Amino acid sequence: MRFGYFDDKSREYVITTPKTPYPWINYLGSENFFALVSHRAGGYCFYRDARLRRLMRYRYNNVPTDVGGRYFYINDGGEVWNPSYAPTNTALDAFECRHGLGYTRITGERKGVRASLLMLVPTGHTAEIHQLTIKNTTSAAKSLKVFSFIEWCLWNAYDDMTNYQRNFSTGEVEIERNGATLYHKTEYRERRDHYAFYNVNADVAGYDTDRETFLGLYNEWSEPQVPAKGESSNSVASGWQPVASHGLDVQLAAGEEKTFVFTLGYVEVPREEKWEKPGVINKKKAHELIAKFSKPEQVDAAMKSLADHWSKLLSNYSIESPDDKLNRTVNIWNPYQCMVTFNMSRSASYFETGIGRGMGFRDSNQDLLGFVHLVPERARERIIDIASTQFPDGSAYHQYQPLTKRGNNDVGSGFNDDPLWLIFGVAAYIRETGDYKILDEQVPFDNDPKTAVPLFEHLKRSFHHVLNNLGPHGLPLIGRADWNDCLNLNCFSETPDESFQTTGNRTGRTAESVFIAGMFVGVAPDYAYLADKRGEAGEAKAARAEAAKMTDVVLKHGWDGEWFLRAYDFFGNKVGSKDNKESQIFIEPQGFCVMAGIGVEGGQAKKALDSVKERLDTKYGIVLNNPPYSEYHVELGEISSYPPGYKENAGIFCHNNPWVIIAETVIGRGDRAFEYWKKIAPAYLEEQSEIHRLEPYVYAQMIAGKDAVRHGEAKNSWLTGTAAWNFVAISHYLLGVRPDFDGLRIHPCMGGEVSKFTVTRKCRGAEYRIHVKNSGQSGSSGAPKLIVDGVPVAGDIIPYAKPGSTVIVECEV
Ligand code: BGC
Ligand code: NOJ
């Protein structure tokens, strides 16, 4: 069942009912000011840090769900309704929510009044704009009372929901222009140099800034007393819960329409200029910001600039094919999600509260794979930030804080896959840009400037960190965990509330990871290539030799007969083996070892992938492991803490499905790869939204596996490495256009279902138009036939063209 449709021309998903199976959200903002907005106008905004600079209060895990947002109440002859349906839930004659790239437009209609609410964060500004257009569609005049409403968060979102003994007494506001501009200056009297405001570009009939007055102490959100009465109370908040509400008298002749622009802004003021006079805040910057968006034409211009911004970004990789679902995924929604993930990391979504984790070392390097072709200069900056948190021995803080860019001591280090992800990220960046100079950048360890060395040295430490930490079989030690944060082989936690990721009861040097081994073999050629490029031929040679050695070790000690083993535990017992009672096979090593080329020649790769098909594949995607753990295993940790079928215990972890998809292309089985890809690609799930439940335009981290009670139901949409990896799978491997160090590689491998397509790829300043005739026959060895600007070319790499040029490629597979 569908709850909307894709409008590809407008690059929008159009939701046609307020009653979607879960709040379906969008993100506004792409620089410093961000907002989450659901199809019912729920959500909140913040400046840079979702925890420390939160402007609007939001109630996670509330009843009903999705409470807190930008609400417009319309009182039409005594009946109160919202264009966003919520929170009054008054029936609408028509409803539509259009989530677009960086904006959302919600339209509701009732009894001859159509109200349309456009929300965006204009590029270059720290404000959320709400443009409300109200139209009288009847042939008689209408007299409406309209009330805006937002509730302020008292800045620190954690304190805001925990420390009431203090914060019920801190709220302060200022009122200007008879209530048309409402200021939230809580804590400004002391250490804060910033405030927020909510402005409307019209004269108001009244205002409210005190929640209890507006809503009533015991009232539901659906029965606020000010809108019901049809008259603002001009309340002035002092402590308790400051809010901002404008009261507007809106007279509309038959057929008439009026537009109001509201600006919800954030400004910072230099400390010495904080006050206009004692107790009165300096409003200069607020006035400037308000003046920029006081007319609808200015909002139109901001929308235009937003659209241009996205057109430019998205033009770096686009496809035309007969498959609309494929086109919209590749051209719009997958890269859009990658950009949102770049901006948010794992901080604020409808499943992450914005007060939890910092930026992940591993996460950020993987995210980079999906956004490097969109904003390469920001990828560069991110790489330097990440590498600056590495330790001298090559290990890394697992997370760092975006505001301070410092490693996070609470989480610490010891996730032994982390260092390798840095090589991964840097190689992807150099492939995209050709910027080898980044390897010379002076980058410190643990943010200590005295320790700065060239970035390449960081890669070296990463590589050698694995070699310096091998276990009894010669496989890499797993440490706290590898990619699978929930496989905690050294943790042995018996105490509730301990974190599986940070509690280390035993520091054994026995638990080994076949996943890290596969990853090591996979990144070694890139590392060796870069070493050669820097004239370190000896290091390059040694790296290649180590990779060959590791390959042998994997085939000897990491092969279980029909698939790759997952690990050896603390006691040296096998994990992910036919000898185990449960979890005999895991997805991760099958994907990563085959991607690295291990066992491709000897036939183990094909066997492993056939085992994936047989044991892990389901109707809704590939599960992580099988059979799931049915009880808690202290020697395995968090993985066995989830009921069967959820999360890392045999859920369909969408993040690692693309590893198998890519692996299938490595052995030339494009049709199977495409089939797997379609199973989890959101656009293909639209028809089953009642089962999937989450947004059909973005990936979710997890879909409940075959052993779960709710097989097929997704959780944790938006902020997940799934976005980047699936983009890599489809764009680099299935459609087969990927930048390599010395040229653009063109090697489609997706079976024959899509018989022809054109990829337009901009890379290193040139544009490539690649027309593919796709019979689907190409295997890994079956190189495509390429004609470049009329000249046949051998192999599958075409050299990079001069910046500014356009290259026409005919490709036949
Ligand atoms: C989740 C993992 C996550 C980890 C660290 C676990 O509870 O299941 O997906 O990576 O916490 O935050
Ligand atoms: C979520 C983490 O962010 C990611 O890094 C990890 O690999 C997965 N969980 C799997 O546990």
Image (tube, grey):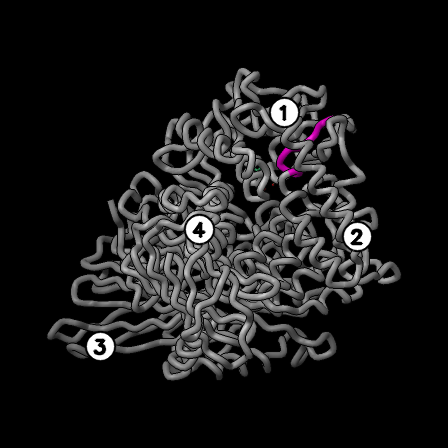
Number of labels in the image equals 4
Amino acid under label 1?
Leu
Stretch in magenta = 510-517
Q: Is residue 514 magenta?
A: yes
Amino acid under label 3?
Leu
- Location of the N terminus (image quadrant): top left
Q: Marks 3 and 4, Cα distance to the nearest angstrom?
A: 69 Å
User: Which-is-in-front pick, marks 3 and 2?
Assistant: 2
Can you identify the residue that label 2 sits on? Answer: 539
Q: Work out whether residue 454 or residue 732 is closer to the camera in this orientation and state it.
A: 732
User: Which-is-in-front pick, marks 2 and 4?
Assistant: 4
- Please report contact status of discs 3 and 2: CB closer than 8 Å, yes or no: no
Task: Report x, y in % for residue 172.
Answer: 58, 64
Mark 4 or mark 1, which is nearer the start of the sequence? 1
Mark 4 or mark 3, which is nearer the start of the sequence? 3
Residue at left offset 38%, top offset 56%: 813
- Seen as rendered, the residue at the extreme right is 450
- Left or right placement of residue 452 versus residue 412 in this view: right
